[in-house]
């Protein structure tokens, strides 16, 4: 018994040591402390699991509501072969200079079409312009100021004040439905671009010629568009509205955004170039976006299957809208089909596409905008919308990832290809010829030539 008591006392002392005590108390004190610990232990357990549950719940909340943004700059995609050959790492100071040198040495082709077609083009995403905010936007060979009044209305004007040339998008203040120049506080109406006030004018008169160009704009489905046309008398066409987005039934799950080094016509031409789908987008998505390594043997267990057709508008249909039908599926060992998606794409003018998707789990939509920032630099954005559900919280983020990888494969081609005005086509490429004939309607006799646009940038 005496030996047993000694063993119990030793174990209790050890237990007390674990609890941060010195272990010098009597056996009775040690027993009392042990009992207190046993009483508190359930509460510690409750607090521990409760805290863990709160953390997991918050993580789930973020996953459910947080949007996914995949963004790549002009030099991020398609130049690793040059960097690898020169043994230049991502953090090397010469990285951007090396890529820009390659861009200058690239032969872009002869007889390029005008770089800025006619049509509606996205200049900003709605979420990036708050009430009372003004932003400078450079695109389509223009410098614009885009501002939102406190009432929520969006206006787009030429950026430079006719007084002494200050950029109203850099420090300009929104006051009422006007924007105030940061240099001398001249105010210009967002309704027509007319100057409404010169604060230091003693006569109080404003010259009638003190006026900025007012651009037609439209805000719909998360984008702010401007109408760009070299012939001012041409009326803009109506942009199709996805009502499920506009009335809030479908929610925004995220986007990708890219700067691409190519002519604007190259990007939507992919819709008619159905032969490239198997070559570029057939290899397994998990093999990545670098087309040098996108066909490894280990990834052959699964391949993407594509069936596509492109169609110009028929008689009686709006001439500015072309259609593409596409069926995508993923095939395991070329036998088992899964992940089937039916796509109807509407190419609305030169710079806007609505991709209506149908899956076994429900519908969703991807909106693509292509905006020329420079003659051979395009900003491409895809925004993803679907009904709010846990399934879509998972699937839409996967879709953004998958679409981004596939788009980056195209970028590796676009960033280095020539534009060939009269390409060598075979019978199976007939849709490309149809596409180019349809797209030519967005160029006018007065459209700025590629050479002139380049000279304006290179002065």
Image: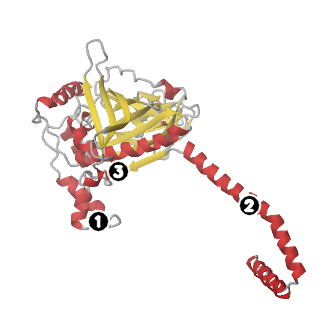
Q: Whole-percent x and y of residue 265?
A: 24, 35
Circle 2 residue: 45
**Of the image marks 2 and 3, the number of the one nearer the N terminus:** 2
Q: Is residue 25 left or right of residue 185?
A: right
Q: Are marks 1 and 2 in contact (CB under 8 Å)?
A: no
| Distance (Cα) linking label 1 and label 2 | 56 Å
Q: Are marks 3 and 1 in contact (CB under 8 Å)?
A: no
Q: For the point 67% across and 53% down, which residue is it?
A: 53
Q: Is residue 170 left or right of residue 333?
A: right
52 lies above or below 340: below
Q: Residues within 10 Å of mark 3 (few under 14, many from 20)?
A: few
Q: Secondary structure at mark 2?
A: helix
In the depicted view, which residue is nearer to us: 154 or 414?
A: 414
Q: For the point 13% across and 35% down, which residue is it?
A: 421
User: Which quadrant, please, contains the N terminus?
Assistant: bottom right
Q: Whole-percent x and y of residue 144?
A: 40, 38
**Of the image marks 3 and 1, the number of the one nearer the N terminus:** 1
49 lies above or below 347: below
177 lies above or below 379: above
**Of the image marks 1 and 2, the number of the one nearer the N terminus:** 2
In the depicted view, which residue is nearer to us: 276 or 423?
A: 276
Q: For the point 83% across and 73% down, which residue is it?
A: 34
| Distance (Cα) linking label 2 and label 3 | 42 Å
Circle 1 residue: 94
Mark 3 or 1, which is nearer the eye? 3
Circle 3 residue: 286
Q: Whole-percent x and y of residue 200?
A: 53, 40
From where the camera sits, is residue 29 visible? yes
Q: Whole-percent x and y of residue 289?
A: 31, 50
Q: Residues within 10 Å of mark 2 (few under 14, many from 20)?
A: few
| Distance (Cα) linking label 3 and label 1 | 30 Å
Q: Is residue 100 left or right of residue 110?
A: right
């Amino acid at each position: 018994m005496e030996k047993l008591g000694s063993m119990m006392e030793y174990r209790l002392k050890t237990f007390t040591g674990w609890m941060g005590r010195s272990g010098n108390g009597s056996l009775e004190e040690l027993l009392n402390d042990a009992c207190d610990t046993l009483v508190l232990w359930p509460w510690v357990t409750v607090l521990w699991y409760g805290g863990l549950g709160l953390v997991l719940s918050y993580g789930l909340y973020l996953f459910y509501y947080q949007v996914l943004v995949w963004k790549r700059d002009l030099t991020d995609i398609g130049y690793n072969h040059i960097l690898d050959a020169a043994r230049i790492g991502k953090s090397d100071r010469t990285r951007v200079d090396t890529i820009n040198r390659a861009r200058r040495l690239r032969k872009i082709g002869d007889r390029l079409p005008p770089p800025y077609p006619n049509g509606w083009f996205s200049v900003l995403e709605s979420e990036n312009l708050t009430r009372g905010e003004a932003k400078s936007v450079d695109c389509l060979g223009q410098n614009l100021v885009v501002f939102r009044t406190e009432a929520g209305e969006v206006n787009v004007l030429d950026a430079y004040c006719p007084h002494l040339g200050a950029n109203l998008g850099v420090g300009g203040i929104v006051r009422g439905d006007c924007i105030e120049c940061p240099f001398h506080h001249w105010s210009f109406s967002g309704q027509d671009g007319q100057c409404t006030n010169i604060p230091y004018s003693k006569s109080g008169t404003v010259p009638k010629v003190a006026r900025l160009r007012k651009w037609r704009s439209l805000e719909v489905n998360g984008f702010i568009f401007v109408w760009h046309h070299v012939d001012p008398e041409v009326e803009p066409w109506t942009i199709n509205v996805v009502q499920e987005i506009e009335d809030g039934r479908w929610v925004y799950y995220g986007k990708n955004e890219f700067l691409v080094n190519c002519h604007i016509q190259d990007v939507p031409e992919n819709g008619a170039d159905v032969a490239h789908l198997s070559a570029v987008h057939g290899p397994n998505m998990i093999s990545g976006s670098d087309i040098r390594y996108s066909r490894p043997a280990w990834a052959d267990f699964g391949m993407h299957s594509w069936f596509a057709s492109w169609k110009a508008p028929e008689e009686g249909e709006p001439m500015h809208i072309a259609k593409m039908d596409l069926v995508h599926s993923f095939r395991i060992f070329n036998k088992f089909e899964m992940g089937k998606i039916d796509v109807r794409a509407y190419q609305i003018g030169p710079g806007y596409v609505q991709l209506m998707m149908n899956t076994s789990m429900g519908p969703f939509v991807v909106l693509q905008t292509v905006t020329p920032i420079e003659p051979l630099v395009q900003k491409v954005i895809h925004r993803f919308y679907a009904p709010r559900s846990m399934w879509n919280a998972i699937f839409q983020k996967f879709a953004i990832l998958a679409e981004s990888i596939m788009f980056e494969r195209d970028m590796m081609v676009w960033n280095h290809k020539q534009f060939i005005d009269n390409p060598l086509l075979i019978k199976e490429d007939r849709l490309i010829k149809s596409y180019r004939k349809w797209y030519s309607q967005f160029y006018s006799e007065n459209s700025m030539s590629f050479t002139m646009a380049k000279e304006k940038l290179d002065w």
